[in-house]
Image: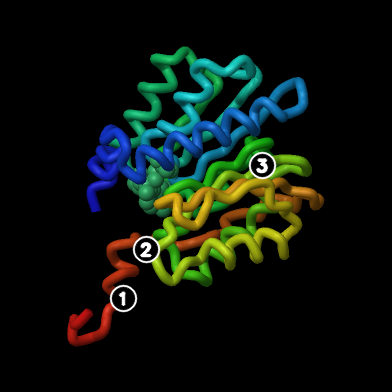
């Protein structure tokens, strides 16, 4: 999978991905608007080019209150995000080229006020979606927000994702309509943060392309 080119759809006006990006940006803006005054921390898992967070922060009144860490494995995407942060003067935003599944990469930046898990769940097995959500109390502070995405292709996992967040102390703030052409959810953590485990793997990023092949019948039909 070419994860640089995956971002090209963001530049096709009206594409589901472009519309999803718009919604994620709006939700990031709302979460920042509602955040308490003072310093804020943001982490983004599998951050890609950072187009969601960085474009919002560039013009948001809270921009200089925010320290953030974007964790992205693809070196070209990470370089793109780093350059965008620099160009926008967001000097408190770090971009780490690393496996976002490993808890150690968030040390010093969690519990965060805002956790972005966008473009991730569609690339994980159900078991790993659940284990990632179960890890969110290590990443998110009380009152903090998780913004996540999952496409609505069948089997539609959005209802299950909402159940799993509820089981782990998160209140549902907003979920996109089922027919929106994408899935975006916003959950707020009402529980107590858990200490960050050392060296823990939250998920294995399988990839939606590999997952769909795993689901296909062995003879390739259908
Ligand atoms: C579907 S894209 C989403 C990018 C971004 N979060 C967004 O929504 O625009 C998935 C991203 O995850 C990255 N990725 C894949 N496996 C990863 C891993 N183990 N750790 C960090 N990033 C990973 C890919 O390089 C790609 O940029």
Nearer to us: label 1 or label 2: 1
Q: Which mark is residue 45?
A: none
Q: Earlier in the sequence, mark 3 or mark 1?
A: 3
- Tag 1: Cα neighbours inside 10 Å, few (<14), some, or many (≥20)? few
Measured from the top left, where is residue 30 in percent x and y?
63, 31
Nearer to us: label 2 or label 3: 3
Residue under numbered circle 2: 206
Q: Secondary structure at mark 3?
A: strand
Measured from the top left, where is residue 12 in percent x and y?
26, 35
Measured from the top left, where is residue 120 in percent x and y?
45, 53
Q: Which mark is residue 214?
A: 1
Q: CA distance from mark 3 to mark 1?
A: 33 Å
Q: Earlier in the sequence, mark 2 or mark 3?
A: 3
- Tag 3: Cα neighbours inside 10 Å, few (<14), some, or many (≥20)? many
Q: CA distance from mark 1 to mark 2?
A: 10 Å
Q: Residue at x 62, y 60 (%)?
A: 162
Please state if 106 lies on the left or on the right of 50 as rendered.
right
Question: Does the Cβ of the disc 2 residue fall within 8 Å of ligand 1?
Answer: no
Q: Which mark is residue 145?
A: 3
Marks 1 & 2, CB-CB < 8 Å contact = yes
Q: Earlier in the sequence, mark 1 or mark 2?
A: 2
Q: Quadrant of the C terminus?
A: bottom left
């Amino acid at each position: 999978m070419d994860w640089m080119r995956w971002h090209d759809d963001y530049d096709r006006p009206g594409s589901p991905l472009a519309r999803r990006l718009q919604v994620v940006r709006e939700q990031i803006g709302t979460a920042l608007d509602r955040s308490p005054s003072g310093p804020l921390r943001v982490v983004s898992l599998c951050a890609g080019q950072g187009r969601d967070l960085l474009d919002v922060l560039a013009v948001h009144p809270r921009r200089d209150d925010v320290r953030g860490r974007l964790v992205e494995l693809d070196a070209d995407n990470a370089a793109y995000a780093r350059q965008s942060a620099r160009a926008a003067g967001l000097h408190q935003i770090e971009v780490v080229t690393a496996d976002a599944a490993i808890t150690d990469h968030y040390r010093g930046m969690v519990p965060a006020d805002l956790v972005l898990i966008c473009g991730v769940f569609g690339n994980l097995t159900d078991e790993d979606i659940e284990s990632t959500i179960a890890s969110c109390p290590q990443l998110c502070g009380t009152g903090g927000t998780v913004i996540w995405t999952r496409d609505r292709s069948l089997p539609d996992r959005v209802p299950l994702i909402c159940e799993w967040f509820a089981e782990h102390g998160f209140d549902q703030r907003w979920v996109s309509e089922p027919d929106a052409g994408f899935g975006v959810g916003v959950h707020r953590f009402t529980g107590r943060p858990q200490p960050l485990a050392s060296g823990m793997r939250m998920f294995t990023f399988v990839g939606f392309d590999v997952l769909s092949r795993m689901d296909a019948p062995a003879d390739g039909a259908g």
